[in-house]
Image (cartoon, rainbow, N blue to C red):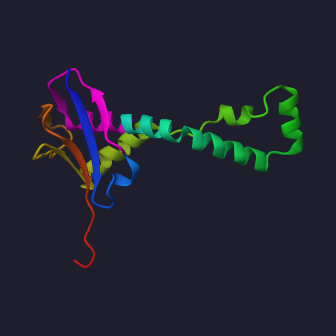
Amino acid sequence: MPELTISCRSTIAPHAAGIAPVQFHYPARTIAVRELIALAVREQCALLMQRHAGALAQAQTVLARQYRTAAEISAEAAGGAVNAAVASTPLLLEPETEVAKALRGFEAGAYLVLVGSLRCGALDDMIALDLVQPVQFVRMVALTGG
């Protein structure tokens, strides 16, 4: 199985605003651009949620402590679950929503998908996987002043 390394590089920020390269296994030698984007975005969502899970949980706890009433906190403490409200409502990315946004962005020309030096033109294009060719998502930005 080929292992792809997807590198999301941005012309806006040197490290694509915090999106690290992702790796995943794909069982075939060819893939549609649509599926390549979807796999990369799902993996990015998983990594971002994992990386920021502690911060999200801490933010939820701070907000819960700030805005719950003393009666709510006492009732939860009596039931042995002071942070139950926090635990039951995790802040999560919705991978399929993010995939849909990424597919729309590709179609609108917001970014390019490059496999080696080949620029992918359409979501249904099939590309051959080659372990030596880098795969990059390159964000496009308009130049200021012209």
Q: Position of residue 100 (x, y in %)?
A: 36, 42
Q: Measuring 37% from the left and 46% from the top, which residue is drawn there?
A: 19
Q: Which residues are magenta?
A: 20-42
Can residue 117 be found in the magenta stretch?
A: no
Asked which quadrant contains residue 5, the reply is top left
Residue 52 in the figure: left or right of residue 61: left
Quadrant into which the C terminus falls: bottom left
Q: Measuring 24% from the left and 52% from the top, which residue is drawn there?
A: 138
Q: Measuring 31% from the left and 57% from the top, which residue is drawn there?
A: 14
Q: Position of residue 55 (x, y in %)?
A: 58, 44
Q: Position of residue 137 (x, y in %)?
A: 25, 47
Q: Position of residue 128 (x, y in %)?
A: 11, 32
Asked which quadrant contains residue 46, the reply is top left
Image: 35 above or below 18? above
Q: Measuring 18% from the left and 37% from the top, which residue is drawn there?
A: 124
Quadrant into which the N terminus falls: top left
Residue 145 in the figure: left or right of residue 51: left
Q: How many marks?
A: 0
Can residue 35 be found in the magenta stretch?
A: yes
Residue 118 in the figure: left or right of residue 77: left
Residue 47 in the figure: left or right of residue 33: right
Give 113 or 14, whichever is nearer the viewer.
14
Which residue is the extreme one toward the bottom?
145
Asked which quadrant contains residue 3, the reply is top left
